[in-house]
Amino acid sequence: MKDFNTEVEVRSFITKEDFERFFVFFKENAKFLKEDYQETFYFNTKEDLRIQKNNFFSKIWMKKGKIHDKHREEIEIKFDRNDFDKIERLFLSLGLEIEIKWFRNRHEFLWNDITVCLDFTKGYGYIIELEKITNEKEKEKEYKKLLEKLNSLDIKITSQEEFNERFLDYKENWEKII
C-alpha cells in the first residue's frame, strides 16, 4: 500500500480582486484542471467526517487531526454522483447530524507539481489554497515548499487562528448566511 495519503496545504483568504487576478495568472502560467461546484456537509463526529457532491462524483471523506492543520491524513471513498442523497440518508439514519453545509465554486490548476484551488464559498469568502498529497515523512518539507510558493505570489498566509475564528462564525451562522 502506498503511503501517499497526507494532505499538505497552505491557504489564505483573498479579496475578490485578488481572486480575479490570480485566475488570470494561473490560466496563463499553469494547467487548468477543472471548474467544479461542490456541496459539502460536515457531520458532528469526533473526526472531521464529510460528504460531498460535486460536478463529477460524490464522496465520503475523513481528515484526521484538527480542521485547518497544515497537514492531515485523509481517507476518501468516491461514489457515483447520484448516490449523494443515499449517503446522506445513511449517515442521518445512523444518528449523525449535519453541523455545516458548504456551497463552493472551485477552479483547480496544476502549477508545476502543486494543486492550486481558487475558491468562492457562499457566505465564507474567497480563498486560495496550494496543496500536495505526500507521505508522512515528507510533510514538513512539502509544507515549506508550499509556503515559499504562496509567498512568491506575494500573499501573506492567513493564520490558523483567523481561519478557526471565521470557521466558528460560519458554523454558528451558516443557516442564516446561505
Image (spheres, grey):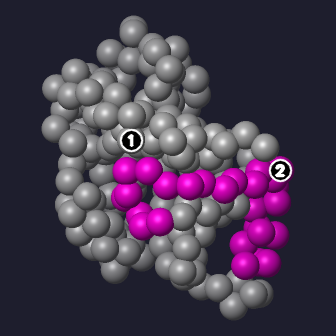
Label 1 sits on residue: 140
x and y percentages locating residue 35 in the rendered image: 55, 32
Q: Where does the N terminus fall, quadrant-wise?
A: top right
Q: Is residue 31 above or below residue 121?
A: above
User: Label 2 sits on what residue type?
Assistant: Asp
Label 2 sits on residue: 80
Q: Is residue 19 visible?
A: no
> Which labelled disc corresponds to residue 60?
none
Q: Nearer the viewer, residue 147 or 140?
A: 140
Decide: few, some or many residues near mark 1? Use Cα within 10 Å; few <14, some 14-19, many ≥20: some
In this picture, residue 9 sits left or right of residue 84: left
User: Label 1 sits on what residue type?
Assistant: Glu
Q: Is residue 60 visible?
A: yes
Q: Is residue 129 above or below residue 59?
A: above
In this picture, residue 147 sits left or right of residue 55: left
- Give residue 69's quadrant in the image: bottom left
Could you tell me how far apart the alpha carbons at marks 1 and 2 are, in whole angstroms?
A: 34 Å
Residue at (20, 53) in percent of width and height: 159
Decide: few, some or many residues near mark 2? Use Cα within 10 Å; few <14, some 14-19, many ≥20: few
In the picture as drawn, the residue positioned furthest to the top comes out as: 28
x and y percentages locating residue 109 in the rendered image: 49, 24
Q: Which residues are magenta?
A: 65-91
Residue at (60, 85) in percent of width and height: 97
Q: Where does the C terminus fall, quadrant-wise?
A: bottom left
- Give residue 175's quadrant in the image: bottom left
- Which of marks 2 and 1 precedes in the sequence? 2
